[in-house]
Structures are given as structure tokens and as C-alpha cells.
């Protein structure tokens, strides 16, 4: 089944998590909204680091020029992100859908990432990272998703490990840790493939 990769914050490791799943399981990749760095977008990153030939990258619904909250980036570009214009691409394959920013980040003034998640009606993998405040951000994200009855498949931790924090989050939320991605010294096709080969990636 297709899955949504959501994060507790921006720059949390969602794209690396997406790359790992695409490489391991051969899923397609789609980021509905890209804000900024269009020449080196997350779709470009996935194309560069995923060597699994089954992975097809679908074009974004919105490509915005400014690296900012999508609602503001769209305003600068003179456009508005409209819910009806974001539709799951047609594919015979499963798709990894990566959101832009945290789950409460706004796409428009009445349209948040969590609304997009609810709209697509697919299971969510929540990516967390260990930093001061990450327990709070993770628990708030889980609570917000559960309030909307959105199904959470589990958690992925990305970056430096902190077993005390991770165990607390796992026990408090009663969610499985699907896998953890270490802080890789280099991020490229070889390092992603080597990580995938270390053990089965199950979601």
C-alpha cells in the first residue's frame, strides 16, 4: 500500500526516509508541493540516490520558487495551493508521498499538511529526530494525527540515536519503530543502498 511520509518538523529526515523505502521496496516517489531549490529539489535528490529501477518519480503538483512555508512561497509566486489540484498520481506501483514541512505546516490559509494527509487517506509513517524538544514535537504530531483518526503505521528515527528518548516515545505512543536511519557521513546512491542491505526494511 502507498504511504505518506510526514515529519515532526522541517529538515527532519523525511526525504532520506523516502529514499530508503524507494530503494528497498521499489516504491514510486511523489512530493506534492516543493518550495524552493527547484534545481536540487527532493525529487531530484531521490532520482540521484535511488538506484532501484522500479522507482518512478512523479512530478510535483506545485513547484514554488521560495524556500519558505508553502502558503507564503505560493503567495510570493502569485498563486494559491488548491486542494482539488492535488491528486494521487496514477501508478500500478505503490507510492511514497512526502509532505513539505511538519504536519501542521500550511499549504494555504485554510489548508494544512494534515488536511492533505486526511484527503489522501493513506497510512502515515512519522519521521522523528533526536534534538532538544523532539519528544514534545513527536507527541504533539502523533496526537494531532490521532485526533483526525489518521492511521499511523509507525515511527522512523533519523540521525543521531538517543535510546532514552526513542524508548520513551515508543512506550508513550505505543507505536512501533519501523526502522532507524543513522547519521550517514555521506548521502549518495552507494550509502543508501549499503544501508538498505544491512537489514530488511519493513513498513
Image: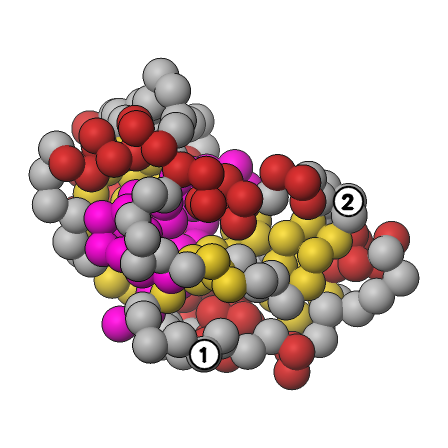
Q: Which mark, by number, is residue 201?
A: none
| Residue in front for this viewpoint, 59 or 99 | 59
SS under mark 1: loop
Residues packed near mark 2 inside 10 Å, few (<14), some (14 to 19) or many (20 plus):
some
User: Split into 4 quadrants, where in the image is the C terminus?
Assistant: bottom left
Give the image location of residue 59, x and y in percent.
58, 62
- For marks 2 and 1 on the same chain, the one whose residue lies earlier in the sequence: 2
Q: Is residue 191 left or right of residue 66?
A: left
Q: Which residue is mark 1?
A: 90
Q: Residue at x 39, y 29 (%)?
A: 188
Q: Is residue 156 magenta?
A: no
Residue at the far left: name it.
Answer: 199
Q: Which residue is mark 2?
A: 66
Task: Give yes or no for contact between labels 2 and 1 (Cβ–Cβ under 8 Å).
Answer: no
Q: Is residue 7 magenta?
A: yes
Position of residue 124 relative to residue 72, above or below, is below
The span shown in magenta is 1-28
User: Split into 4 quadrants, where in the image is the N terminus?
Assistant: bottom left
Of tags 2 and 1, which is closer to the observer? 1
Q: Is residue 39 left or right of residue 113?
A: right
Q: Residue at x 74, y 53 (%)?
A: 64
Give the image location of residue 45, x and y in percent.
50, 40
Position of residue 161 relative to residue 79, above or below, is above
Give the image location of residue 136, x and y in percent.
41, 42
Q: Is residue 3 left or right of residue 102?
A: left
| Residue in front for this viewpoint, 68 or 22 | 22
Position of residue 100 relative to residue 169, above or below, is below
Amino acid at each position: 500500500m502507498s504511504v505518506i511520509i510526514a515529519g515532526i518538523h522541517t529538515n527532519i529526515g523525511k526525504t532520506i526516509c523516502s529514499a530508503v523505502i524507494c530503494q528497498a521496496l521499489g516504491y514510486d516517489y511523489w512530493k506534492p508541493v516543493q518550495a524552493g531549490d527547484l534545481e536540487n529539489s527532493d525529487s531530484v535528490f531521490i532520482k540521484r540516490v535511488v538506484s532501484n529501477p522500479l522507482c518512478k518519480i512523479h512530478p510535483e503538483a506545485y513547484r514554488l520558487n521560495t524556500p519558505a512555508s508553502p502558503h507564503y512561497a505560493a503567495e510570493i509566486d502569485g498563486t494559491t495551493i488548491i486542494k482539488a489540484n492535488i491528486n494521487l498520481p496514477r501508478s500500478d506501483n505503490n507510492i511514497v508521498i512526502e509532505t513539505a514541512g511538519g504536519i501542521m505546516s500550511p499549504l494555504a490559509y485554510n489548508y494544512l499538511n494534515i488536511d492533505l494527509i486526511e484527503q489522501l487517506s493513506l497510512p502515515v509513517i512519522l519521521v522523528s529526530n533526536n534534538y532538544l524538544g523532539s519528544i514534545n514535537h513527536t507527541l504533539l504530531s502523533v496526537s494531532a494525527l490521532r485526533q483526525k483518526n489518521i492511521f499511523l503505521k509507525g515511527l522512523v528515527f533519523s540521525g543521531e540515536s538517543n535510546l532514552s528518548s526513542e524508548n520513551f516515545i515508543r512506550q508513550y505512543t505505543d507505536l512501533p519503530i519501523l526502522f532507524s536511519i543513522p547519521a550517514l557521513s555521506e548521502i549518495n546512491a552507494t550509502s543508501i543502498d549499503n544501508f538498505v542491505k544491512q537489514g530488511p526494511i519493513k513498513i
